[in-house]
Amino acid sequence: MAAASTGAGPQAPSLRQGQPRSQSPGTPALSGADLARIDAQLADSDRLLERNYPGDDGSRQPVHTVYVPADRFTPEFAADWGAEALAAADARGGIESLCALQGQGTELAAAVAPRVRAKLAREPIEDLRLDFEDGFGDRGDDAEDAAAVAAASAVAAAVAAGTAPPFIGIRFKCFEAATRARGLRTLDLFVSQLAAASDLPDGLILTLPKVTTVAQVEAMDFAVSRLEEVHSLPAGRLRFEVQVETPQLILGPDGTSPVARLPHAVPGRISGLHYGTYDYSASLQISAEYQSMEHPVADFAKEVMQLAAAGTGIRLSDGSTNILPVGDNVEQAWQLHGRLVRRSLERGYYQGWDLHPAQLPSRFAATYAFYRQGLPAAASRLRNYVEQTGGSVLDEPATARALAAFVLRGVQCGAVGADEVLALAGVGLPQLTALAHPRLAASPTPEQAS
């Protein structure tokens, strides 16, 4: 017969026979053996996180990549584009007028315009890719061989003269069967000639386009590993970007996302994932009129890329717009470009492609406005966090890292001065870098301080 309920609510379960009684208050129940067992269980996880998710290394990320047919590059190329960019802006009222077209108020434009003008005179191109793919085409093996060697020599000359952009490299043909041998030969000739001419540039970047499978990236890893061996380069010296231009890289035949596997197939080798606006859109049968960086298919692909790269240290880049500021379309193209640049920045894509000199003013104007508009609030919150003073927003360490990373990016691209940050946030560049990237030492590298 069941015992009658006392009406006092659920009864506490009695201790099973042989079960130890609770420890006295303040005494841990888990033994050293228990903790050792948990450590052993998580050893593989620890190694995975350490190797595959190192986080961002704190070095400078360019705000854009310029693509130019490889045979058009000369050591004066960047300066020539800067002069053309300034001339295009001055022909239509100056950079202040461009800022007004982008909706910047008088005060903001007054801060942005002189910085953009100085940027176009000093460093108009942050990242340059000499293109042997779509921008070069099929000109025959002899012509491309000669162009690859000449491009390497021109890059070496530009680096020696101090006229090369901080980041520079090539895009070669993809690893699909029809172009694989040609792409590998161009890569080999360029790297080999560059290594023979001088030390490799610190900002050397190689771009593998139209990737469809993980196996193609693994093949690229093998190719650059062999080039490192042949030329006595440190292991891992030749990192490369992957261009995400095909739907097969977003969703594979087995229903998984190959792009999410890339960082773990070749840990530490991939430097960036770049979205390819027009190849990707065309592959999904989007008509030419509606192919855009802001089409829903583009947003979906870029969100998957963002998830795949999170924590891996791999940088992201948005694509380009082919609406160029030329002829009677300059003002409208500047407005569109500025809006798209801003849109990318707000979504965590801090880099994009530029295809014409007249896109440089709108790129830098929109970028600088983004950082300058956000600086006062970010600096105030950062100061409150560092000084542990109360404010209207309670920021946690993760948010403080995001605030510091935002401000640091503004400094690195020239939108914000380190002196401004010190005045507003009360932190110098070494502390700002340490807040943004806690794994790094507090003192920045020369590249981080540039």
Image (cartoon, rainbow, N blue to C red):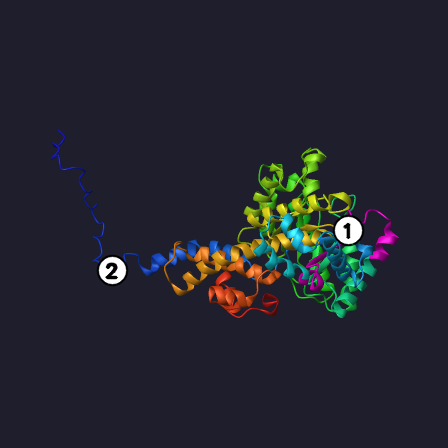
Left of 291 or right of it: where is 306? left
Magenta residues span 118-147
Residue 295 lies, with reference to residue 169, above or below; the image says above
As for residue 144 lying within the magenta part, the answer is yes
**Amino acid type of disc 1?**
Gly
Residue 314 lies, with reference to residue 287, above or below; the image says below
Residue located at (66% from left, 45% from top) = 335
Circle 2: element type: loop
Q: Which picture quadrant has residue 304?
A: top right
**Amino acid type of disc 2?**
Thr
As for residue 346 lying within the magenta part, the answer is no
Q: Is residue 114 visible?
A: yes
Q: Residue 282 at x, y = what percent?
A: 70, 37
**Quadrant (top left/top right/bottom left/bottom right) for the N terminus:** top left
Left of 262 or right of it: where is 382? left
Depth order, front residue of 115/105: 105
Q: Which residue position is annotated with label 2?
A: 27
Residue located at (76% from left, 57% from top) = 81
Q: Which picture quadrant has residue 270?
A: bottom right
